[in-house]
Amino acid sequence: MDGLLTPISTSRLSANKNEPLLQEVVLKKDTAKPNQSSAQRPVNSPEEALEVLRHEPDYDQLVATLRFLDHEEAGSAFSIKEPNPMAAKLVQVLVSEIVPNYWTLLNEESRETKSSALGLLLSCLRSLTGVNAIIVRLKALLQETKAGDGKPKRPDIAINLTVLLNLACLLLKGDDTIRGIWNAATKTLKGNVKTRMLLQEILSTFGSGRILSLTAEALEHAKGHKAEVDTSNIWIANGPEYTKWLSANIVKWQLTSPTPDETKLCSELFLKALRLGHSDMAMKCILTRLLLTQGVDNERFGLLVGNLPRSEQRKVLFSVLKTFAEDYLDRLGTCDTEGGPKMVSAVAGAINSITKNDPDRMTYLVEWLTVHAQVLLLSAGYVHKISPLKLTLLMRSSPWLNAISNRLSSSNQRARFLGMVVGEGLSSLVDKGDKRLNFQLEETELPEGKWYKSLVEIQDTLGSWDLLLKPQEPTQKKTSLKKLSHKPAPSQLRTQGFIIEELSDEDLSEQDDIVGYGKPESDVEDSDDDPELVKRDKAKAPVYVRDLIRYLRDTDDYDRQKLALLTAPTLIRRKANYGTEVTDHAEELASLLVGLQDKFEMDNFDDLRLQAMIAIVVAQPQLMAQWFAKTFFDGDYSVSQRSSILAVLGLSARELAGFETSEYAAAASFPSKSLPEKVERLFLSQSPSNAYQSPSSSSLKPLPRNALESVATSITSNFLAPLSAAAADSATGPDVLKLSTFKSRLSGGDDGTNNAAAQEEQHISNPKIKIKSRTKPRIRAIPNTTAHLISTSFFNPLTARFQAALHSSVSRIRGIMFQPYLLALYLKTLALLLHAAGPSTLALPQMTGDLWRLLLSTSVRAQAVGDVGVTQAVLFGLLTLLDVNEDRMRDVCQELGKEVVETEGWVAGVFEGLRGGDEGGEEERTKMMAAGVLVRLREGVEKYRLMMVGDLIGL
């Protein structure tokens, strides 16, 4: 017996000899004073709270600690609901030590007020960390019960399981629990990676069925040990009740206007709820509250379903139809029931609200409608054989006529076609002669329509399966063809001896026309000596956009990567105007291409990737141009990847405006859309050159990596060429000394040139003689229909996001944007977009003002100091502004007078600060650009000086 009792601690009390050994103890609850130690030691930090909870606190200390940990009550910076190590320690102590000891006492209090001790405890544990701690504790207790080590089990395990089950039920009770847990966890959470991890953890916790299975097992074990368990309150272990709770939380969250990420999380939770084994109950709950409740936005259900995969959307739509049929349509009975047509119309309206604006969901309905039409035709044929009178009466009834009428008035072409073939097929069984229903349309007389109408005549009979025992012969036809093709060769080999044959002249003349076969080319891939090295399962070029995406994702397969890059530009352009493949997968495809790495060091990798991204923008410019602009600033990409995004925006805008012609544009066109080559030469002439056409643009050559720099250099050369010619002409001397030059031109020119030169010579010798100025031949301008598109989708998103990044408090995006190479490329891209929009753009004044102010901003000019690349980019932007606004310099000087004068001073400083002298060098080129800007600016200032007096005085 002595071994059964072991002392834990020994305490000795000082004896008072004057006091009796036995004393009466009186408990005074009303006059009990609070513990002085708890009042003297308030909890001021999470560490102190953890220390108090670990050392068996009394009731007052526990309440004070819980009140401190409650974030809303204390208002401290620490929150136990956020995922962090300290919160995990506190929650673990609360679940494993505090709850088993204090549950009975806490449960006796009122649960309605949040300020109660139980309310404070639930508030501290209502987080993802708290739910996981309860799950881990339940799992540990269940594993302890299953341990087969032969030792007796602790009798308190069943009681602890009961306590944890009741705690979990109270903790998760309510329709807003999951949303509250999400909001508490994401309040201070930053970064997409952490958000995705939290999303996956919530899905695995609440949607995987782990809570349901563990609680059900714990409940069964508690019942088996005859613990006092109130099973009516433990709803969390009941599958239907848990499904209802999860569905109610999804509905509540969806009705609070969630963000796109939250909507996606709700959709995935909805998908998990359908897989818990009670899909009908989950569907009925969500459908009733989101779609069939007054005052609720009907589009919420469509948004919830729209984020699901296509295969799951099909299952959800089938469940919706099943729910409507069981709850509303099956109780109607026959079609003649009073209120039946109205109920059918109401159900049709509800289904239309789900499937509208989504062609895939409509396709599912049409497929099911097709199957029903086939079954109806087959059934009608059998009914006519058994009881023709019943089919005749059915054909004369109003429901039949209404059904055909509704099909013919449908907006869906497939539904109308099925209605016509069903009507003609059933009418052929009942009506005779001219009374037969015949729409006399080409669709019903095609092979498909005839096949549908022939279904009413099908007769299924039982036959012998002897035909199946006979060998199939399709393979023999192929082998016979091969044998016939190889017969001449062996017949020549079997000839023996010398055969002398006389040939006539006619035979020789006939054989002269015979052309012998050439030597077969050697196959490099099959030339290996080792047959194991020959790869026979070669990848085929993708023909659908989804196949292209699958190839791009397979980064470990060289053949697939190469085929995807070679096929992408042509495939995207070909699919752009046919179907919705490119529209549905444009963003996914673009994100894959932007982040694609040259893992195998392929030839022309950068050019092929660039051409594929250009094809996406050209296919969907309004959507993808804004997406690329957003990705350039918000995406987590390197400087090289961001520069490729700028190149895509600049080159695609030039192609849309007609300045570039991609080599893949002609290859992507369908043969039915083009004329034969000989006819095309007769009717299609070469397109006239545009006034802004860049001579460096190549239509059949791949673009290099510095394509934007090449285009910028070409535009700069075109701008400076007239100025250089005028400067060279004025530097040769006065006009009197140029008579010999004109005489030489007179001797070698044509009549028109001679007359013009003679008039110019007379004018120089006698200035009083006036000649009429010759006007430059005007080039017919091509209508620029893409100017508004370039302005709104290309130019404005780039400038607006740059201004936002300029004033942003985040230093990362500022550091990336002001990297010299990237900043120079960004400024050149804006200039090229303005040049592509052209002078006929309605938004040209706004674009001019935005770009001019951006170039003169303090941040940009500070980066240009000491960096030739950024300086050249700023000067190129100014050259483009002056070139595009050549015909509206008056408006420019009037609207941007201050900027014009400030630009003149800055460019003059740049010109004077450059040494030059190195022919072909960067400084010489920069100095030429500065000189060109100065000449144009001073011409405008001198011409419109009076208009700019106000701005000059202001300066």
Image (tube, grey):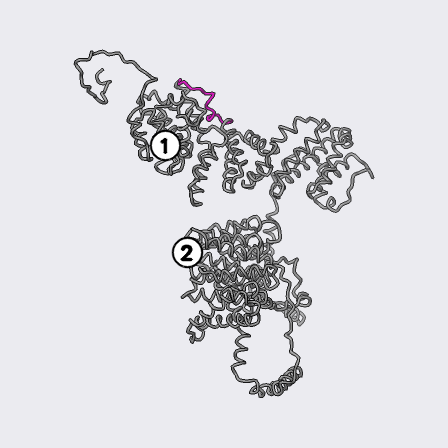
Q: CA distance from mark 2 to mark 1?
A: 42 Å
Q: Residue at x 36, y 35 (%)?
A: 88
The answer to which of marks 2 and 1 sits earlier in the sequence is 1
Residue 450: x %, y % from top left: 72, 43
Q: Are marks 2 and 1 in contact (CB under 8 Å)?
A: no
Q: Amino acid at mark 1?
A: Phe
Question: Along the line of sight, which residue is nearer the eye, 474 or 318?
Answer: 318
Q: Position of residue 442 (x, y in %)?
A: 75, 47
Residue 693: which quarter of the image? bottom right
* Residue 611 horizontal/vertical position (percent): 53, 59
734 to the left or right of 229: right
Image height of 511 relative to 34, above or below: below
Of residues 308 and 568, the one nearer the viewer is 308
Quarter of the view holding residue 187: top left
- The answer to whether residue 178 is left or right of residue 426 is left
The answer to whether residue 98 is left or right of residue 883 is: left
Q: Which residues are magenta?
A: 226-240
Q: Residue 815, labelled with which disc? A: 2
Question: Which of the two marks, 2 or 1, is nearer to us in this view?
Answer: 1
Where residue 626 appears, as percent x and y from the top left, is: 54, 53
Residue 711 in view (yes/no): no
Farthest residue to the right: give it: 434
Looking at numbered disc 2 in the image, what kind of residue is underneath it?
Gly
Q: Secondary structure at mark 1?
A: helix
What quarter of the picture does the N terminus occupy? Answer: top left
Comparing 284 with 73, the one in front is 73
- The answer to if 237 sits in the magenta stretch is yes
Q: Residue furthest left?
A: 17
Q: Which residue is mark 1?
A: 68
